Amino acid sequence: MLRAEALSKVYHMGEVEIHALRGVSLELVSGELVVLLGASGSGKSTLLNIMGGLDTPTSGQLFYGDTALHQASDRELTRFRRDHVGFVFQFYNLIPSLTARENVAMVTDIARNPMRPEEALERVGLSGRMDHFPAQLSGGEQQRVAIARAVAKRPEILLCDEPTGALDSNTGGLVLDVLQQINQELGTTTAVITHNAIIADMANRVIRLSDGKISDIHTNTTQRPARELQW
Amino acid sequence: MVSAQATLLAKLLREVWLARAQLFAIAIVVAVGVMVLMIMTTAKQSLTNAQQTFYNEHRFADVFLELTRAPRNLLTQVQEMPGVAVAEARIRSAARVEVSGFADPIQAQLVSVPEQQTQLLNTLHLQRGMLPTNSRQVVVAQPFAEAHKLQLHDSITAILNGRRTELEIVGIAISPEYIYQIGPADIMPDYQRYGVLWLREDALAAALDMDGAFNSLLIQLEAQADSATLKLRLDQVFENYGGRGAYTREEQISHRFLSEELKQLGTNAVFLPLVFLGTSAFLFNIFMQRQIHTQQQIIAIMKAFGYRPATIFLHYLGFSSLVVLVGLILGLLLSHWLSATMVELYSLYFSFIDLNVDTNWRSLAIAVLVTFAAGFVGTWRAIYKAIRVPPAQAMRPPNPPNFHQSRINHFIATMRLNQAWRIILRNLVRHPLRSTLSITGVALAGGLLLFGSYQFQAISTMLDRNYRVEQQMDVIVHFSQVTDAQALASLAALPGVNYVEGMRSVPVRLHSGTTVYSTSVSAFSPDSKLRQLASMRSLPDAGLVLTDHLAQQLSLELDQQVRVEFIGERRMTQAIPLVAITNEAIGVGAYMALPELNRILLESDVLSGAWLLIDATEKEALYARLNEMPQIAGYSHIREAEEKLRSYMDDTVLTAMSIIFVLAGSLTFAMVYNNARIALAERERELSTLRVLGYSYAEVAIILFGELLLVVLIAIPLGWLVGFLFAAGMTELMSSELFRIPFVVSRQLFGLSALGVLTAAAIAVMFMLRRLQRIDLVAALKAE
């Protein structure tokens, strides 16, 4: 579905060159849930950003189906994100002036084949809080709105950058549980970045990154339900 | 502590540098406010000082009286009247003047100076030369001399009572009586075609047959004298001598123009700076709120390190102080430079002894105080809140902005809008004060544009009406005395004359109750092709027509009888019905059909002047012949006066309009740009999120600028209203006997105002688009 070949990314910070990625090749298989595990600075966020069309690689190739994303224009990348990718961020990034329902509608308004915002919010267990503004929701609830917003357009790929990074263990578990359900029920290919090794247990595959390279790929024979995860 | 201060200063300077564009935009608004305040008050101060000096040093009279002819011994009687400190009699007359090398007709006012003793009142200020010592010598007014490049010992010809007299210029002077020199029928000074000449009394007495007599009286009052009672007594005494009614300085042409100008300056000195400085305070406030919002954690850390709140407050006050300082210096520099230009401009229209640039130090102090207060007020509210938050709380990441269910938010939810417009509306509603002030600021700018362009359009309309519709003659000729209508035939025979119409003008006093008004009745044929009365098809055959302004002043209504006292050669009083009211824009006048006037005055078909249509190519030949005719007291070429006026207008309009555009444009720009900067800073994350979710650059720009667009769109009609009200107010304020500016606000003016606001907003948006493009999506997402 999404295929990366020898991706490299070099940032120039003043006079310093930072090699965030050094030749990463990987493929996301349709319907799988992948956890990208790595310490801070391992390159996992850079990889996710490139795969999501937020950034372009310095070298290497990236294909979504037959589309070459590594040489796509800003306009084409916007199109790719709009049609195929859902994002979940560490700090939720909800629009404060819109209610939960409207935040989801923000995406369904421009999507080709979306579900109704209400349906998306039901899926994340927030049917009772649809008309609340972000300021009136807890962190876990805000993150679930963000997930509803990400999946409402029925994306092929769901990319989650430290989705539990700002949450406590219980709330985090709840959020991951929602992600796992979505993956299983809708078959959305899901990639979760985290530095938390425990979360790896819920994945089909675990990819470890260190120093801009893939250091290990491990397939779980059984996936633990996210609800059982404790940290 | 010293090094701590230095560190804070470094922080301040670097942050000011980072926000330089935004702060500079605010500084410009401050600068414009200071500049306008200083220019207006300096001009007012300079003019007032120059006026007072001139009046005092050259003993400007308090009461004036023009009459036909009175014996000199009446002066003693005047001097003994209660309240009279000094009285002086003199001779005044209109005349024609010729300057060699200048073909156009020149009208002049001849004024006598005493032969033996020195002048008592309205004394001349000789800039060069001396007073005349014999009847062949003359002192000319300085602007007239300058316009014709006349030097001492040059000669000019005066034509008085049909007699040509060659005069030697022995002095060039100005007088407190003629600070503003304007011809009797002019709207603007024309120094080439109108001048004031001072001759020895014997010269004028001889020419006008005034030996032992006078026709003009000047009076200086004692302190606390009652001028109203004196005026009544004077009118009684001089009733039989053709007195035209005593009047005070308030009705004296030069004084009145100057007073109007000073009044106007006073109004502008309050209103315009208030708009700009008020706007700057508001801009400071939103800038500082944002600045402090982003620095909440820094403030917390400073507090945690033990900085006192006062130190922190002073640190942030540094932002506004620095900007105010820059704006103040910039404004003062601009005003210093422009005040001189402004005063110079005034010296073209007002002749003073010495018109110095007198900086109004009090208003400088006010400018400093007000601008710093604006900065302080703008900063105080924002900082006060931040300093009070306990450090521990401030160091936590801020909660999402508190939007909550409210009636208005619920209402927005029910509207059929896309999410982008919901965001826009909710943000507007969330900051009602900020939104209101933004709208007000932009509306004021739009109003300023409409109001500014209105003035010029109104004056141009006034000129159109006066010269294209009401007065269609090319040349106006005045006879030396009332003449038989057969004189028209000889005028028609002159070279270049295509058409002739006769007219008659008679001085009158109009009585209504206790009110008396001195003016003259202009009479012409009801079939006149050259003279139309505004808002009337033709002059009625019988009855009196008055200008609306005059009818109002005399509280007269249609069909009422007006007591008309004729004070020309034939004196009589007659009740004449007011049959029509005309809304002529220039001057106040009374009109009658010529045959009717002559019938009332028991005279045959007589005239006091004529209107001509001429062939411009033959005007030199015509002038030459007119100059030779003793029966012609004077003539003026009205078409040329119009052209001169219009070319002057074109020059002035362009300059003034550009200034107004810059003023209003900078206001709009600063307002929109600042709002956009703040909006971008507040929503960077939100906008990045939308970009990541697949919203295109253009779609995101709509959310950012939609709010501004809405502000501008609401502000435009409000600006129209503001400008409309200003225009109406000014029309009312400026309405005087001299002229009434017609209240005409055309569609173009509304368009111009909207266009100006939209252009300034578009420029601000273009600046912002570049910034929007530079947002780092990933970095913005990571930020808490």
Image (tube, coloured by chain):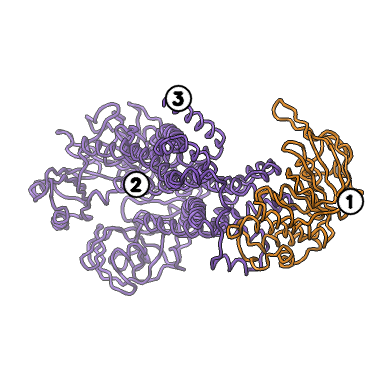
Chain colours: A orange, B purple
SS of the residue at dot 3? helix
Residue denoted by label 1? A29
Q: CA distance from mark 1 to mark 3?
A: 60 Å
From this view, report whether residue A148 is shown above or below residue B316.
below
Q: Are marks 2 and 3 in contact (CB under 8 Å)?
A: no
Please name the residue shown 39% across and 71% down the image. Answer: B541
Answer with left or right where residue B715 lies relative to residue A161.
left
Q: Nearer the viewer, mark 2 or mark 3?
A: 3
Residue B27 shows in this picture? yes
Say which quarter of the image contains residue B131: top left
Closer to us: B8 or B452: B8
Answer with left or right where residue B162 lies relative to residue B284.
left
Residue denoted by label 3? B3
Please name the residue shown 54% across and 46% down the image. Answer: B665
SS of the residue at dot 2? helix
Residue B319 shows in this picture? no
Closer to us: B218 or A113: A113
